[in-house]
Image: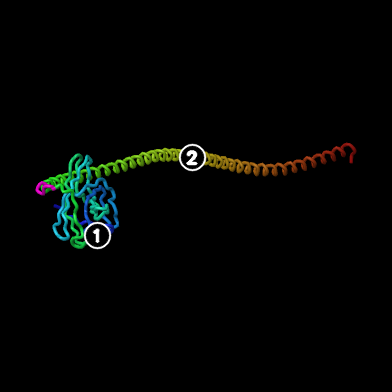
């Protein structure tokens, strides 16, 4: 048998004190089960996800603070029992047990589950709670066997659940990894496209710069050729000017010489003319 230490609710505690004042004990009559795991609170008045309620089939007082409670969960549905509560005769949720990760039991579909637990009520006055059962008179020996089988079945189911959790975890990781791979492939494709565009732009820009550079070089070469041609023409012009200046000086020298010769010749001719005129006059007039 498993011993549970449930959380006694405030409503259940109030019912115990109410009954205690009248000299009567609070009576547990039903078991409720649910499927949500959590840390119970004494302020609860119901289970979080209650799925079924069953009457107490059998029970006994093991000590002043320990009660043995038995119920049979039946019905067509399959249930993972993660929370269990105990109801008093007036429907008050007396106590509740649950755990954030641990599973209490599993009820297969179309099969019965024996809920047999010892309730530890050390926080309550002795004898303040009793059990009201249907008097089904379950065979305790059979209950032990059923409990053992249920324990083995639960253990196997827990292993299956853990394996399923691992499978789900790996499936989620695989999904995340797939999403990451898809994202990386998309980013890589965009990067490759951008690289291709950038590469083409760079090649086009380099070609443009090269063409511009070559054009500038050609213009420079043409300008240099023009400069060289002008320098050569200027040099030739200089030589021509120098030659012309030399010829001009020589002509001026010759002209000066010729001018002096002409003057001398004119003077000689004039002297000769005058001499001839004198002779002519003498000859003519005898003077």
Numbered label attached to residue 212? 2
Q: Residue under circle 1? A: 19
> Where in the figure is residue 153, as x and y percent of width and height?
15, 44
| Quadrant housing residue 198 | top left
Task: Tally the marks.
Answer: 2
Considering every residue shown, the one lying at the far left of the view is 141
Q: Which is more foreground, mark 2 or mark 1? A: 1
Foreground of the two, 45 or 268: 45
| Quadrant housing residue 286 | top right
Q: Is residue 218 magenta?
A: no
| Quadrant housing residue 43 | bottom left
Label 2 or label 1, whichever comes before in sequence order:
1
Residue at image position (18%, 50%) is 133
Q: Is residue 139 magenta?
A: yes
> Dot 1 lies on which element?
helix
Q: Which residues are magenta?
A: 137-142
Residue 99 shows up from this direction: no
Coloration of the structure image: rainbow
């Amino acid at each position: 048998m498993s011993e549970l230490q449930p959380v006694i609710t405030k409503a259940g505690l109030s019912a115990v004190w109410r009954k205690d004042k009248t000299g009567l004990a609070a009576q547990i009559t039903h078991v409720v089960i649910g499927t949500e795991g959590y840390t119970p609170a004494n302020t609860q008045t119901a289970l979080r996800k209650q799925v079924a309620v069953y009457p107490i089939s059998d029970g006994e007082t093991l000590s002043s603070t320990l009660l043995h409670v038995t119920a049979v969960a039946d019905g067509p549905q399959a249930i993972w029992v993660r929370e269990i509560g105990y109801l008093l005769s007036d429907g008050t949720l007396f106590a509740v047990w649950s755990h954030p990760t641990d599973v209490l039991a599993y009820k297969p579909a179309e099969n019965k589950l024996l809920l047999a637990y010892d309730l530890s009520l050390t926080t309550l006055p002795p004898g303040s709670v009793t059990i009201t059962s249907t008097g089904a008179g379950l065979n305790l020996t059979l209950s032990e066997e059923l409990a053992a089988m249920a324990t083995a079945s639960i253990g196997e189911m827990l292993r299956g659940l853990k394996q399923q959790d691992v499978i789900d975890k790996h499936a989620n990781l695989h999904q995340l990894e797939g999403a990451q791979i898809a994202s990386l492939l998309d980013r890589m494709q965009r990067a490759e496209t951008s690289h291709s565009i950038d590469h083409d732009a760079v090649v086009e820009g380099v070609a443009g710069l090269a063409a511009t550079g070559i054009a500038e070089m050609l213009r420079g070469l043409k300008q240099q050729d023009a400069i060289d041609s002008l320098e050569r023409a200027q040099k030739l012009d200089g030589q021509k000017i120098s030659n012309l200046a030399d010829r001009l000086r020589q002509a001026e020298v010759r002209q000066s010489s010729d001018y002096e010769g002409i003057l001398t010749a004119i003077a000689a001719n004039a002297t000769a003319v005058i001499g001839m005129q004198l002779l002519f006059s003498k000859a003519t007039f005898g003077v």
